[in-house]
Image (spheres, rainbow, N blue to C red):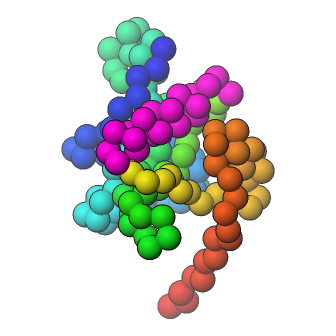
Amino acid sequence: MYEIRLIPKDNIKSIIPLAALLNGLDEKLLETRLEIMMEINYECLGVYDTSASLSTGRENLIGICGLWTLVKLYNGKHLEPDNVIIHPDHRNKGVGELMMNWIDNYAKEHNYEAIELNAYIENLKGAEFWKKTGFYIRGHHFQKLIKK
């Protein structure tokens, strides 16, 4: 059984071990970036395995999805999910679909006009998931790293 809810700001650092799985980045660096993100307008959705919580008495965070509110000229107020991560032990069990249903409902309840996300080209499995949940490819995501 799963419970999906926004993670309170005072517990946001609980996402760092899962975030490290996706990015392979140092946890201290992730913590520093997360603090800055929280100052802007970052929220994070958590998926908890409630069956594990019953036996251990602790919440078991098994999935996360960052949420940004943005406004752009071409699609208005929109929600941007990012860093969608499901713990490997819980993949292919419908957790991603549950998470996206929650996000769809949240966007409707809060009067967003669209949901928009970026996905890496090499993430073919992810691209199939996004298409399956109603997204379509609209453009390219370009990045330029600034060398110091």
Residue in the image at 34% along x and 39% along y: 109
User: Can you give x and y, in whole percent of width and height, for residue 106 in the image?
Assistant: 38, 39
Residue in the image at 40% along x and 8% along y: 55
User: Can you give x and y, in whole percent of width and height, for residue 86 in the image?
Assistant: 57, 36
How many marks the image carries: the answer is: 0
What is the span of residues highlighted in magenta in the rendered image? 92-111
Towards the viewer: 47 or 22 = 47
One can see residue 119 in this view: yes
Residue 46 is inside the magenta segment: no
User: Can you give x and y, in whole percent of width and height, for residue 64 in the image?
Assistant: 47, 40
Residue 108 is inside the magenta segment: yes
Residue in the image at 58% along x and 31% along y: 97
Displayed quadrant of residue 4: top left
Q: Specify the principal SS of the magenta part.
A: helix
Q: Is residue 92 above or below residue 37?
A: above
Residue in the image at 62% along x and 25% along y: 94
One can see residue 33 in this view: no
